[in-house]
Image (cartoon, rainbow, N blue to C red):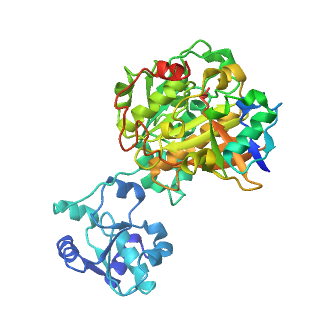
């Protein structure tokens, strides 16, 4: 079980939750679990960078990056605002 | 009781003096004596003998031991005409210095002989007072402050992030601030854009920001660009020799344009972005770390990236993030500390937590990668819209 940080732009899809727990041994499994429980996330997660314990999974094994139990996973989308 | 002249004569009889010619010859030897200027700060600033150190006579006793720990080291003292240095020589003798001489005729005689003098770049008295809290920090000091006064920073956007960033950079004495913004001040801006005032409503933001900055610190030369940054004007605006860019833009096309231009012009970008309660800060330094495209190769579709105008923003959030941007900028200008290169700071105002993420260069980045495929400006509006078509 890992804790996934939901960015403010996707919290409408997680009923306002800032953090949710998700199951999965890899980032792919984790995100699938998330989408199965919050179906409106479908198609939106690919626009966020994924960090496992502060490391960008693109510099690890991408969606196959393994996720240890109790890891903190942060979803980070680009934000345009400087306003 | 002895008068001044009598006292001076008596002191001069007790100490050793050398003339300017002899002093110059000594200074040219392989092991020159240490030359100490004991005049006031303002006299030193107007010119001094090259190679001298400055310890005003008033603090000579307390500071000489740190400057010259070895009592046997030869020391030559000078002032303007050789009187204050005579008294100073006697004092050093009392402190146990074994080889102390006073320059007869002082700096005046030195100049009369046509010998070299030097004027240091220095802060005047007013600036030494204004920036005194910087001067007290060893990592900044007078040298650092002079560096800031000669620095040039471009702010893209005079909105939420540009407001605190420009005010703090101006207060810090950054010598030139460029501001790019096409908008006018709107009532809904005033909840967070602290560089603008209620009385500025309807005024171009570059003008009200300029007025606020000039009122805060007349040392700052403000250069305004009342236009949007575009592919057409980017080279012109970036061609002013900026040392850093503070990116406080409010849209993706400008973010990507700032990135590409900064890579090609080799200028670091201090990035900040905000939404509701969350902010991101990082530094994109060409060659040293990733660029914006390494981090976000493509922008999200508009429905997934609402702006503050659509989703709102806590008024103080840009204050926090813009101040962090100012902090990173000052570090870059001063060359101190560890800037956020290759690191992204994520701030959550609701939980008051910072998370840090590691950012790495993408070797196949189309702009800063090993084999770039984008080498000139593209249509950024189309790029940001077209990806998801």
Q: Which residue appears at 50% of the width and 58% of the height?
A: B139
Question: In the rendered image, which quarter is residue B67 located in?
Answer: bottom left
Query: Residue B190 location in percent, x, y?
Result: 68, 22
> In this figure, what is the number of numbered marks?
0
Which corner quadrant holds the C terminus of chain B?
top right
Q: Which residue appears at 56% of the width and 28% of the height?
A: B299
Question: Could you tell whether B146 is left or right of B337 in the image?
Answer: left
B298 versus A1 height, above or below: above
Query: Residue B209 location in percent, x, y?
Result: 54, 25
Query: Residue B23 location in percent, x, y?
Result: 22, 74
B46 versus B10 height, above or below: above
Query: Residue B206 location in percent, x, y?
Result: 51, 22
Q: Which residue appears at 26% of the width and 72% of the height?
A: B104
B346 versus B49 height, above or below: above
Q: Residue furthest top?
A: B202
Question: In the rendered image, which quarter is residue B75 located in?
Answer: bottom left
B81 versus B179 height, above or below: below
Work out whether residue B294 or residue A60 is closer to the camera in this orientation and state it: A60
Work out whether residue B7 or residue B262 is closer to the camera in this orientation and state it: B262
Is residue B130 shown to the viewer in this render? no
Question: Could you tell whether B323 is left or right of B127 in the image?
Answer: right
Work out whether residue B320 or residue B232 is closer to the camera in this orientation and state it: B232
Is residue B294 shown to the viewer in this render? yes
């Amino acid at each position: 079980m890992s804790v996934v940080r939901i960015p403010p732009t996707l919290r409408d899809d997680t009923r306002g939750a800032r953090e949710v727990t998700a199951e999965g041994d890899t980032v792919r499994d984790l995100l699938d679990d998330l989408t199965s429980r919050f179906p409106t996330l479908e198609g939106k997660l690919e626009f966020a960078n994924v960090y496992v314990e502060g490391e960008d999974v693109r510099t690890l094994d991408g969606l196959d990056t393994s996720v240890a139990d109790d890891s903190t996973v942060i979803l980070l989308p680009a934000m345009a605002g400087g306003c | 009781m002895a008068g001044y002249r009598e006292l001076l004569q008596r002191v001069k009889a007790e100490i050793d003096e050398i003339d300017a010619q002899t002093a110059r010859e000594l200074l040219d030897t392989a092991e020159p004596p240490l030359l100490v200027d004991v005049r006031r700060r303002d006299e030193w600033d107007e010119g001094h003998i090259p190679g001298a150190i400055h310890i005003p006579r008033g603090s000579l006793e307390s500071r000489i031991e740190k400057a010259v720990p070895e009592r046997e080291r030869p020391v030559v003292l000078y002032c303007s005409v050789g009187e204050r240095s005579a008294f100073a020589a006697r004092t050093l003798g009392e402190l146990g210095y074994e080889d102390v001489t006073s320059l007869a005729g002082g700096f005046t005689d030195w100049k009369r002989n046509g010998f070299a003098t030097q004027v240091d770049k220095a802060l005047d008295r007013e600036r030494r007072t204004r920036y005194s809290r910087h001067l007290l920090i060893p990592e900044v000091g007078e040298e650092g402050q002079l560096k800031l006064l000669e620095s040039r920073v471009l702010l893209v956007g005079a909105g939420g992030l540009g407001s605190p960033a420009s005010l703090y950079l101006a207060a810090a004495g950054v010598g030139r601030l460029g501001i790019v913004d096409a908008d006018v001040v709107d009532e809904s801006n005033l909840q967070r854009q602290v560089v603008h005032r209620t009385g500025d409503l309807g005024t171009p933001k570059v003008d009200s920001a300029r007025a606020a900055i000039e009122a805060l610190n007349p040392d700052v030369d403000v250069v305004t660009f009342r236009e949007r940054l575009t592919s057409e004007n980017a080279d012109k605006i970036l061609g002013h020799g900026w040392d850093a860019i503070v990116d406080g833009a409010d849209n993706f096309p400008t973010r990507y344009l700032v990135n590409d231009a900064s890579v090609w012009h080799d200028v670091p970008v201090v990035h900040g972005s905000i939404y509701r309660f969350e902010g991101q800060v990082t530094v994109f330094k060409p060659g040293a770390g990733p660029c914006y495209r390494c981090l976000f190769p493509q922008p999200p579709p508009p429905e997934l990236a609402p702006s503050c105008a659509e989703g709102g923003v806590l008024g103080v959030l840009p204050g926090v993030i813009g101040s962090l941007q100012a902090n990173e900028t000052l570090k870059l200008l001063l060359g101190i500390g560890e800037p956020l290169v290759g690191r992204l700071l994520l701030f959550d105002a609701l939980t008051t937590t910072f998370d840090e993420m590691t950012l790495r260069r993408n070797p196949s980045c189309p702009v800063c990668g090993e084999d770039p495929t984008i080498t000139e400006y593209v249509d950024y509006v189309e790029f940001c819209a077209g990806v998801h078509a």
